[in-house]
Amino acid sequence: MSKDQALERAVRLLGPLEGRLMRAVWSGAVRQPFVVRDIQKVTPELAYTTLMTTLNRLAEKGLLVQAQVVRQRAYEYRAAGTAAEFLSVASREQANRMLEQFGEAALAAFASQLENVTPTERERLRKLVDAD
């Protein structure tokens, strides 16, 4: 999967505003580390307080790392990981939730989708299974 594909898939897992801000962070539209004012430059139509609240929530969710700037009342933020890393963690969490909720039915549904997978993807999956 390309970096752009991972970015788009990761952003879709977030709400509209969170996705928009993380797209700016992961794509490099805002340099890291950044403060609220930096991200406001790429989203000027959004209120400072809206951005501050959303960035704090992204930090609470583990997508951003937050550090207080010495001698200032502002926080600096940086991505906790790449879009691909977030997508990987979110995928594992989703798979675990499905297995917990649906058990063998989830495995059967997943297996039924293997016929739609390309031979290359099937081989990658086989290697992942064999690695465990």
Image (cartoon, helix red, strand yellow):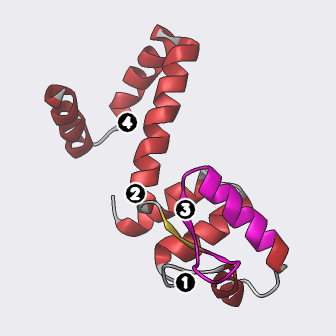
Mark 3 / mark 1, whichever is N-terminal: 1
Using the image, tell me which numbered label, if any, was put on residue 30. Answer: 1
At 50% from the left and 79% from the top, the residue drawn is 33
State the quadrant of the N terminus: bottom left
Disc 1 versus disc 4: nearer the observer: 1
Residue bearing the label numbered 4: 116
Answer whether residue 56 is visible to the viewer in this image.
yes
In which image quadrant can residue 123 be found? top left
Disc 4 versus disc 2: nearer the observer: 2
Three-letter code, disc 4: Asn
* Disc 2 secondary structure class: helix
Q: Is residue 64 magenta?
A: yes
Three-letter code, disc 1: Val
Three-letter code, disc 3: Leu
Mark 1 / mark 2, whichever is N-terminal: 1
Q: Residues within 10 Å of mark 2 (few under 14, many from 20)?
A: many
Mark 4 / mark 3, whichever is N-terminal: 3
Up-down relation of residue 66 to residue 97 (above or below): below
Disc 4 versus disc 3: nearer the observer: 3
The Cα atoms of the two marked residues, 4 and 3, are separated by 35 Å
At 26% from the left and 43% from the top, the residue drawn is 121
Residue 45, percent across and down? 82, 84
Residue bearing the label numbered 2: 84
At 42% from the left and 17% from the top, the residue drawn is 107
The Cα atoms of the two marked residues, 3 and 2, are separated by 14 Å
